[in-house]
Image (spheres, helix red, strand yellow):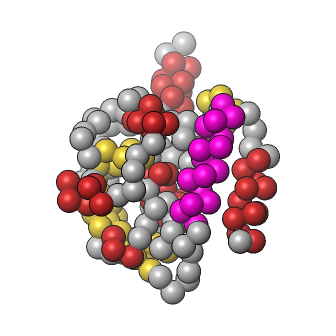
Amino acid sequence: MIRMNLALSVLSRLPVTLSGVELTKRGRAMAQLALTSCNLFDSSADRVTVHFINRDGERLTATAKEGESLLEVVVNQNLSIDGFGACEGTLACSTCHLIFEEDVFQKLDAITDEELDMLDLAYGLTDTSRLGCQVCVKKAMDGLTVQVPAEVADMRRELEVGKQSK
């Protein structure tokens, strides 16, 4: 409970914009809900192995805590996935877009309208696409393999290209 209150306290002080993306009150609330619901199951004894197939085909393996979001796994394990999680899990981008195998996708928690809206912005969208910030690791996911799409919609990269061409 202390961890949940701390997370809510920190998130309530998030700036109105993050990585150049304006956050709505509803977006911030959804991010808070996702973070706290994922971390309700946190226990240091519950470890799960997760594999990420990177854009270049490299297989990255991480040990995650049950309850972490897949975005948190990438960040906490310092996995080298370029541009992943630009909005830091505030549900304001699609850079943590992941592709799941059909059988695993069917077992994930329900997708929200807000997540669907962000997925509409993702490159390489599939029927089994989800945002890593919205998927919580569960013990049953041990050995999970997810695919990072070949392309990413990252406004930071587009802004850099625009500056270089001037």
Q: Is residue 81 magenta?
A: no
Q: In terms of depth relative to the viewer, which is nearer, 87 or 159? A: 87
The quadrant of the picture occupied by the N terminus is bottom right
119 with respect to 5 (left or right) = left
Could you say where residue 71 lies in the image, as x and y percent from the top left? 49, 55
- 112 vs 17: above or below: below
- 98 vs 144: above or below: above
Give the farthest residue toward the left: 102
Task: Classify residue 121 by image quadrant.
Answer: top left
111 with respect to 8 (left or right) = left
Residue 156 in view here: yes
Give the farthest residue toward the front: 110
Give the farthest residue toward the top: 166
Q: Which residues are magenta?
A: 24-39
Residue drawn 49% across and 51% down? 133
Residue drawn 33% across and 32% down? 123
